Amino acid sequence: QVQLVESGGGLVQAGGSLRLSCVASKSIQRISAMGWYRQGPGKQRELVARINSDDITRYADSVKARFTITRDNAKNAVYLQMNSLKPEDTAPYYCNVESSAAPYVHWGQGTQVTVSS
């Protein structure tokens, strides 16, 4: 069973930066996309950033120009560089991998990001 191991979360002041990492415990076949989601208090889980196999990226409007998603295919890893953090960015962040091979979707356990004002 593949596990997605996330790291890089923590407590930071508003305006600061964090870099999240997500590495798969073993190779995932036929990855179609990798991404990050978050779930703020009382909210539904939402897409933060996504990058597909053609390196086409998509971002939530609220993080555009502040966050950058990248991937390392050789390491089955995805990263999220978060700059100019705001208190409203506070949430657990979840790594997600989509594949065209079963089980098709993988989720990490989440890493907490807390931004103080």
Image (spheres, helix red, strand yellow):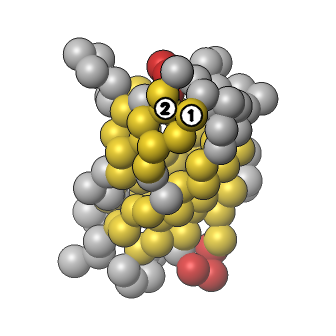
Q: Where is residue 106 in the image (x, y as percent from the top left)?
A: 32, 58
Residue 89 drawn above or below residue 27: above
100 over 113 or under it: above or below: below
Q: Could you tell me the amino acid type at mark 2?
A: Val
Cα distance, mark 1 to mark 2?
A: 5 Å
Identify the residue at horizontal 33%, vertical 30% (top origin). Answer: 39
Disc 1 and disc 2 in contact, CB within 8 angstroms: yes
Image quarter of the N terminus: bottom left
70 with respect to 35 (left or right): right
Identify the residue under disc 1: 13
**Which residue sits at x=44%, y=49%?**
10
Observer-nearest of 112 and 4: 112
Q: Residues within 10 Å of mark 2 (few under 14, many from 20)?
A: many
The residue wearing badge 2 is 115
Residue 73 visible: yes
Side of 43 where 34 appears, left or right: right
Q: Circle 2 — which element?
A: strand
